[in-house]
Amino acid sequence: MKKILIILMVCGLPATIVIYGDSISAAYGIGLDLGWVTFLQKKLKAEGYNYDVSNESISGETTAGGVARIDGVLAATKPKVLILELGANDGLRGLSPVIMKQNLSMIINRAHQSGAKVLLISMRIPPNYGPRYTELFYQTYPALAKTLKIPYVPFILNDIALNKKLMQGDGLHPNAEAQPLIADKIWFYLQPLLVTVQ
């Protein structure tokens, strides 16, 4: 598979990275052109990686919604890498972390079956949901990454969520200034999954 991908990239045909997330990846409140996904695409080009980025994120998406859409997205985009950023809306609705983990597992397994690598993005929810629930929610991500042997990114809004200068007025969504910082955090974990032609 890797040899085929290299041949395609040498021939000038870009591989695809799919961003599969919710409002954090859909650039809620600021517009797609200012979102972290756009900065990631620019970073890929600047670093010489021949990938197109397809942003399949939907604001308000839950992991159940992600399961319902994944087969269609994989068939349409045929990604080599899937960046999975879902779960926050499950947490904000107080849904079961066990069910969330099952849904994320299904998405990851289907992506693997299609030939895509997966990078899991972990999220946190506000502390007012209580320490037990918030910790159960967050620990779902590293536990799942360990079980399925995939890389994961620690909370991407760490050092951002509590900085009012980097957040929108709702206190949940990062503003335009925060987007390059998010892209840089993700890039560190994404780069080892990429194929480049020297």
Image (spheres, rainbow, N blue to C red):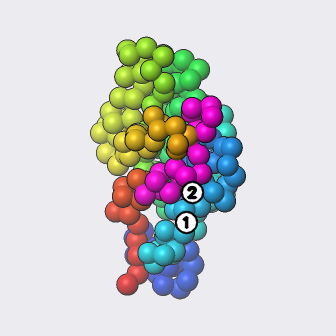
Label tally? 2
Residue 176 position (above or below residue 140): below
Residue at label 1? 41
Name the spot of residue 40 as percent of width and height, x first.
52, 62
- Looking at the image, residue 16 lies above or below residue 61: below
Judge whether residue 83 is colored magenta. Answer: no
For the point 57% across and 32% down, the residue is: 171
Q: Amino acid at mark 2?
A: Val
**Residue at left offset 66%, top offset 59%:** 33
Q: Is residue 54 above or below residue 11?
A: above
- Marks 1,2: beta carbons within 8 A: yes
The quarter in which the C terminus is drawn is: bottom left
As drawn, the residue found furthest toward the front would be 165
Q: Which residues are magenta?
A: 168-184
For disc 2, the marked residue is 37
Regarding residue 67, the answer to whether it shows in the image is: no
The residue closer to the viewer here, 37 or 86, is 37
Residue at x 48%, y 16% (from the top left corner): 129
Q: Tag 1: residue type?
A: Gln
Q: CA distance from mark 1 to mark 2?
A: 6 Å
Circle 2 — which element? helix
Question: Is residue 175 located in the magenta-colored stretch of the structure?
Answer: yes
How many residues crowd mark 1 within 10 Å: few (<14), some (14–19), many (20+)?
A: some
The percent coordinates of residue 168 (x first, y second) are 61, 39
